[in-house]
Image: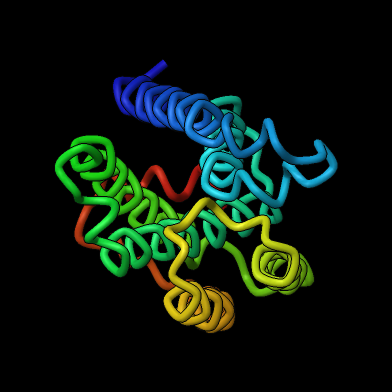
């Protein structure tokens, strides 16, 4: 095995493990909310943890030499959407999330979800638009319905007008994210073109 292959495999393994760690942390974070919900709704609650789990699976497959375009769209679009959504919510409700007693936890979450946005962009332009991309966008829209019609969104401060704005933002973000991924997929765009290593890593996911 060449040095290049070793470096790439190490990269895929490390990133997959980091994402698995994020998934475990997410389950811990959502545990209080999940304990009060019917398990049938859990999958529409743990949005960010599921997103990084999909990313972990995509990188693990790349490590094994397997490519899956549907998983690329699922991991990329969900990481991007829920990364941006979380950053927006943390800033929008800053008086709660960055209060002295909460600040440390949510500064960490702000940084990690910015990382999710970057990770989501890593998956853009890898594959041509397909039914899988439309299906992922539709799934995110269904998730928005559950979140704001049935109340399965992450726990937020009880400020109705702000929750309404968050719902509108989330639905608009689903549409924007899907359109962005479609646009970049049509052009097979590489937003990491400045990095030769990341460009080579992306080829193993195509």
Query: What x and y, as percent, mark residue 18?
Result: 39, 27
Q: In this view, does 4 lie above or below 185?
A: above
Please state which of residues 154 and 133 is positioned toward the viewer in this rendering: 154
Q: Is residue 12 above or below residue 91?
A: above
> Is 10 positioned to the left or the right of 20 in the image?
left
Say which residue appears at 39% left-offset and 25% top-offset.
5
Q: In this view, does 55 lie above or below 169?
A: above
Query: What x and y, as percent, mark residue 154?
Result: 54, 52
Q: In this view, does 192 lie above or below 163?
A: above
Query: What x and y, as percent, mark residue 157?
Result: 42, 59
Residue 187 appearing in the image = no
The furthest residue to the left: 100
Query: What x and y, as percent, mark residue 107?
Result: 21, 44
The furthest residue to the top: 1
Say which residue appears at 37% left-offset and 64% top-offset.
89
Quadrant showing the N terminus:
top left
């Amino acid at each position: 095995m060449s040095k290049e292959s070793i470096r790439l495999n190490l990269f895929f393994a490390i990133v997959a493990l980091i994402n698995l760690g994020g998934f475990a942390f997410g389950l811990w974070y959502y545990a209080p909310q999940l304990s009060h919900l019917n398990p049938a709704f859990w999958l529409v609650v743990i949005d960010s943890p599921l997103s990084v789990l999909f990313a972990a699976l995509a990188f693990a497959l790349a490590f094994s030499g397997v490519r899956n375009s549907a998983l690329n769209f699922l991991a990329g679009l969900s990481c991007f959407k829920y990364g941006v959504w979380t950053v927006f919510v943390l800033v929008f409700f800053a008086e709660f999330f960055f209060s002295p007693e909460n600040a440390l936890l949510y500064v960490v979450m702000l940084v990690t979800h910015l990382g999710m946005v970057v990770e989501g962009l890593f998956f853009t332009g890898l594959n041509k638009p397909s039914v899988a991309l439309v299906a992922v966008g539709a799934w995110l829209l269904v998730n928005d319905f559950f979140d704001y019609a049935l109340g399965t969104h992450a726990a937020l401060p009880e400020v109705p007008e702000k929750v309404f704005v968050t719902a509108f933002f989330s639905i608009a973000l689903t549409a924007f994210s899907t359109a962005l991924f479609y646009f970049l997929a049509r052009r097979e765009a590489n937003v990491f073109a400045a990095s030769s290593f990341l460009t080579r890593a992306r080829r193993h996911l195509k």
